[in-house]
């Protein structure tokens, strides 16, 4: 799948310039991932490269691979294709045991709207499919978003705002 890249991260949390509070949150997620405990998804906001570095560090600390998903490439203009892509992603993540990192989560997070016409209905369907998959996924999920907006009210997330470069 062209929108998924799996890597074996080498960066550790100690190499990141983080506040004490952000370090504690990321360390807690890494510890939970290492022990197999399910936690609410993590939303990393701010600089895109720092979000990726933090996701890699969490996976490294947990001793796991990182499955990086470019959400901008997952979302399709064709009805039903985004949902099929999400199904493929979650199936691959379940079988690999990798930590799932959705890069550019703004693409889906900004779509949930009040339905005014048929196009809005399909935009909501994509986010609803992500929510459904998250509800049944038992492993670690991290979202990276450039905007500092909150996640949709319907996704319980731990939010870490990363400092700018």
Image (tube, rainbow, N blue to C red):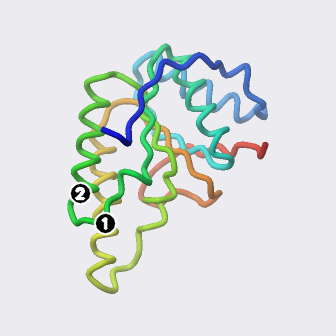
Give the quarter of the figure containing the C terminus: top right
Q: Examine the rendered structure and indicate whether residue 23 appears above or below residue 14.
A: below
Q: Secondary structure at mark 1?
A: loop
Whether residues under marks 2 and 1 lie with C-beta atoms below 8 angstroms apart, the answer is: yes
Q: Quadrant of residue 140?
A: top left
49 or 108, which is in the foreground? 49
Q: Which mark is residue 66?
A: none
Name the quadrant containing residue 10. Answer: top right
Residue at image position (32%, 32%) is 138
Q: Which residue shows up at 65% across the image and 18% down it?
A: 12
> Which residue shows up at 38% across the image and 42% down it?
3
Q: Which residue is mark 2?
A: 81
Q: Is residue 20 left or right of residue 114?
A: right
Q: Is residue 56 above or below residue 47?
A: above
| Residue 78 on image: x %, y % | 25, 65
Q: CA distance from mark 2 to mark 1?
A: 8 Å
Frontmost residue, 74 versus 128:
74
């Amino acid at each position: 799948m062209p929108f998924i890249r799996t890597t074996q991260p080498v960066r550790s949390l100690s190499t990141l310039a983080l506040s004490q509070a952000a370090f504690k949150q990321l360390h807690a997620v890494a510890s939970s991932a290492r022990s197999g405990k399910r936690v609410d998804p993590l939303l990393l906001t701010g600089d895109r490269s720092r979000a990726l570095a933090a996701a890699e560090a969490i996976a490294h600390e947990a001793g796991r691979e990182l499955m990086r998903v470019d959400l901008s490439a997952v979302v399709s203009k064709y009805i039903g294709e985004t949902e099929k892509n999400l199904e493929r992603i979650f199936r691959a993540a379940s079988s690999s045991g990798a930590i799932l990192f959705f890069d550019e989560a703004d693409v889906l997070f900004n779509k949930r709207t009040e339905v005014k016409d048929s196009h809005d209905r399909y935009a909501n369907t994509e986010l609803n499919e992500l929510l459904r998959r998250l509800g049944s996924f038992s492993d670690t999920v991290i979202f990276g978003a450039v905007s500092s907006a909150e996640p949709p009210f319907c996704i319980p997330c731990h939010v870490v705002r990363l400092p700018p470069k």
